[in-house]
Amino acid sequence: MDYKEAIEYIHGTYRFGSKLGLENIRKLLEKMGNPQEGLKVIHVAGTNGKGSTCAFLNSVLSEAGYKVGLYTSPYLEMFNERIQINGKPVENERLAELTQRVKEKVELLISEGNAHPTEFEIVTAVAFCYFKEENVDFLILEVGMGGRLDATNAIDKSLVSVIVPIALDHTQYLGETIGEIAAEKAGIIKENGLVVSATQSIEAEKVIKDICNEKNARLEIVKTYNYQIGRRSLEAYEFKSTGLNGFGKLKIGLLGEHQIRNCILAVRVLGILVSEYGIGIDSEAIRRGLENARWPGRLELISENPCVIIDGAHNRHGAIVLDNFLKYHFKSKKKRSGKMIAVIGVLGDKDTNGIVEETVQFFDSVIVTEPENKRAMQVDDLKALVEKKIDLVEGIKNAQEAVERALKCAGPEDCVVIYGSLYLIGHARTLIARR
């Protein structure tokens, strides 16, 4: 099996759907020799900020000299991004070899009368094998969806369970209320484990506390709102937090006020690693790691003159974050010299109304398109929603053509903001890099 065949095999298993549950993944991992056992895992669940929090943790631990595995989803431009060590994606040949081995075990499972594993289960098995064989010092493991029944939860224990802010998302799978969704997210909490949670809604916090009590787990809820912002630019944010004693002013390269909250959460997790496990992480590694952390496709400035920003704002919460960011950096329409042009593409199972309501009125014109995904919202349906809020709306089905159209319309003083589904963001990022 070569790399192309491996990717075709992995994506070909998409037809088996998305099934929450641990029976299949545990059987598959058992066939693979249980590679998840013995890994020192930092397990991250929640709705908003998982990837960014993982990026901060990964960057700091790498700066501290450790060999750090990172497993995330989805990818932006290249599948290998999902499985990294110290920022370097798994090599094509290695991915192909591991996928071949997992495929053989999948076929054995099926011959024994078991259900076919899902795409996410197969990729998770590949990742566990890779990190085990590479003998990583730590594995930062991002939950795919939910937590309790997510394939990543096949691990028996973790160094710490991290829960970022919880909001309504994937309601068809996880529940209709914040409490129901919180119960699924908090399902990663282990017996007698350590738990670090961001500030949550009252409903979500109660659920997390109840589960911690049931499992005799120690919980720290971080006051992620406890900070004062200093300088803000399209290159970096500076802040101080009274909750992070001894650090004074910190700088982060990830943009947006919400990233300050993700950063504070990550630093407290690092503090737990130091205080509870004696892991060596000095303050300079923390400073360098926070400043150098990158998480592509999230409020990322990828071009100037014209300014081009891409952002995976794929739910209402993300849309609010984007709106606040734009209002701060670009002010109102009356105060800026250039035009604001949006390109939007979303998946049909997302809170499209929420995304549209929170953002589109900021723009002078909007181009709606379709991400390259079977779940993409049809361009005419999205266009009809946007037209309720703004007059200048154009629908272009092909995502590449939509991005090209926006760039062609933009002058040196204008700003193009491409947002919505990460499938659209990745496509746009690749296209603009080639230009």
Image: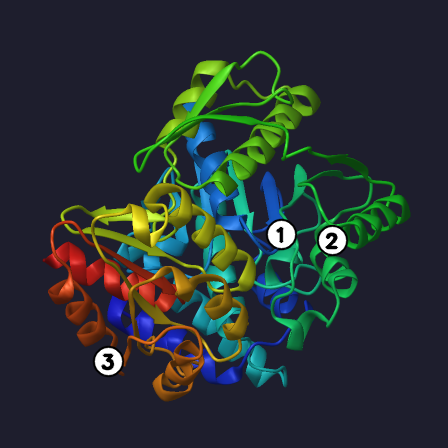
- Residue that label 2 marks: 186
SS of the residue at dot 1? Answer: strand
Q: How is the image coloured?
A: rainbow
The amino acid at mark 1 is Ala
In the foreground, 56 or 94: 56
- Label 2 crowding class (10 Å Cα cut-off): few <14, some 14-19, many 20+? many
The amino acid at mark 3 is Asn
In the foreground, 180 or 33: 180
Q: Say the numbered circle drawn on residue 170.
A: none
Find the residue positioned furthest to the top.
Answer: 246
Q: Earlier in the sequence, mark 1 or mark 3?
A: 1
- Residue that label 1 marks: 45
For discs 2 and 3, the disc positioned in front in the rendered view: 3
Q: CA distance from mark 2 to mark 3?
A: 39 Å
- Residue visible at 62% across and 21% down? 274
The amino acid at mark 2 is Ala
Would residue 169 be found to the left or right of residue 65 on screen?
right
- Label 3 crowding class (10 Å Cα cut-off): few <14, some 14-19, many 20+? some
SS of the residue at dot 3? Answer: loop
Q: CA distance from mark 1 to mark 3?
A: 33 Å
Compared to 168, does 292 lie above or below? Answer: above
Discs 1, 2 touching: Cβ within 8 Å: yes
- Residue that label 3 marks: 398
Would residue 388 be found to the left or right of residue 316 on screen?
left
